[in-house]
Image: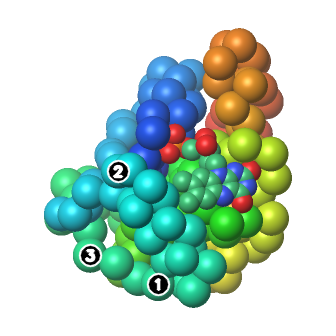
């Protein structure tokens, strides 16, 4: 059973969640990165605009071939109740190479329709989903919450 965790993170929360998921699943991991930074207030505004408009943005080349895995777990921060633009770009490009999928997100409060959007972009229903809030990350509760998600993934593969 081979599992790949793929994620984008602007401020580190999705990265923490992804790293924990990798540890719980014994998975490989890949971070989506961009040629252009999005720090500061202008980066924040641009991120919100891109997410709302469904923009596809340039991302750096990735290493792992998703088609060589049994399942790919994809993680995004929530931006404007939507998927982040770098993860949208990744899914749009990689769609035909994806095996079964699971989705997770880091957010302040609500994921909106993000998991439905991810299902539409991949053309695949997820075997499991998980939404992790800022307080979950700060308190460390996310580790416990991820156990249910990781178990659902394991039993599906
Ligand atoms: C532009 C922007 C828009 C956001 N919109 C939402 C939102 O609609 N709902 C929400 O719960 N959190 C929202 N957030 C908060 C992030 O989803 C949250 O802080 C997340 O943990 C960030 O993940 P990261 O640290 O991996 O970048 C937004 C953050 C940014 C930068």
Query: How would you rate the neighbour count of disc 3 (Cα within 10 Å): few for under 14, some for 14-19, many for 20 or more?
Result: few
Tell me the distance, in whole angstroms, between the alpha carbons under discs 3 and 1.
Answer: 10 Å
User: Camera-side residue: 117 or 42?
Assistant: 42
Instruction: For the residues labelled 2 and 3, say whether their Cβ atoms are less than 8 Å apart.
Output: no
Tell me the distance, in whole angstroms, between the alpha carbons under discs 2 and 3.
Answer: 16 Å
Circle 2 residue: 39
Eyeballing the image, is 51 above or below 101? below
Residue 146 image point, x, y percent: 70, 29
Q: Secondary structure at mark 3?
A: loop
Q: Ligand 1 closer than 8 Å to the CB at disc 2? A: no
Indicate which disc residue 47 carries.
Answer: none
Circle 3 residue: 58
User: Camera-side residue: 119 or 82?
Assistant: 82
Direction from residue 66 to residue 59 in the image, left or right = left
Residue 74 image point, x, y percent: 53, 54
User: Camera-side residue: 132 or 3?
Assistant: 132
Nearer the observer, disc 2 or disc 1? Answer: 2
Residue at image location 80% in from the left, 64% down from the top? 112
Circle 1 residue: 55
Residue at image location 66% in from the left, 82% down from the top? 120
Among the two numbered marks 2 and 3 on one chain, the one whose residue lies closer to the N terminus: 2
């Amino acid at each position: 059973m081979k599992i790949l965790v793929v994620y984008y993170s602007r401020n580190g929360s999705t990265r923490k969640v992804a790293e924990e998921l990798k540890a719980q699943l014994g998975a490989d991991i890949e971070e989506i990165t961009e040629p252009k930074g999005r720090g500061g207030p202008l980066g924040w505004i641009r991120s919100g605009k891109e997410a709302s408009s469904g923009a596809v943005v340039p991302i750096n080349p990735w290493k792992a071939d998703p088609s060589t895995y049994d399942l790919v777990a994809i993680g995004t921060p929530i931006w404007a109740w939507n998927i982040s633009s770098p993860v949208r770009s990744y899914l749009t490009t990689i769609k035909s190479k994806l095996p079964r999928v699971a989705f997770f997100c880091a957010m302040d409060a609500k994921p909106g329709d993000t998991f439905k959007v991810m299902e539409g972009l991949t053309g695949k229903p997820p075997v499991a989903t998980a939404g992790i809030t800022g307080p979950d990350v700060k308190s460390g509760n996310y580790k416990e919450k991820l156990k249910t998600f990781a178990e659902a993934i394991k039993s599906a593969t």
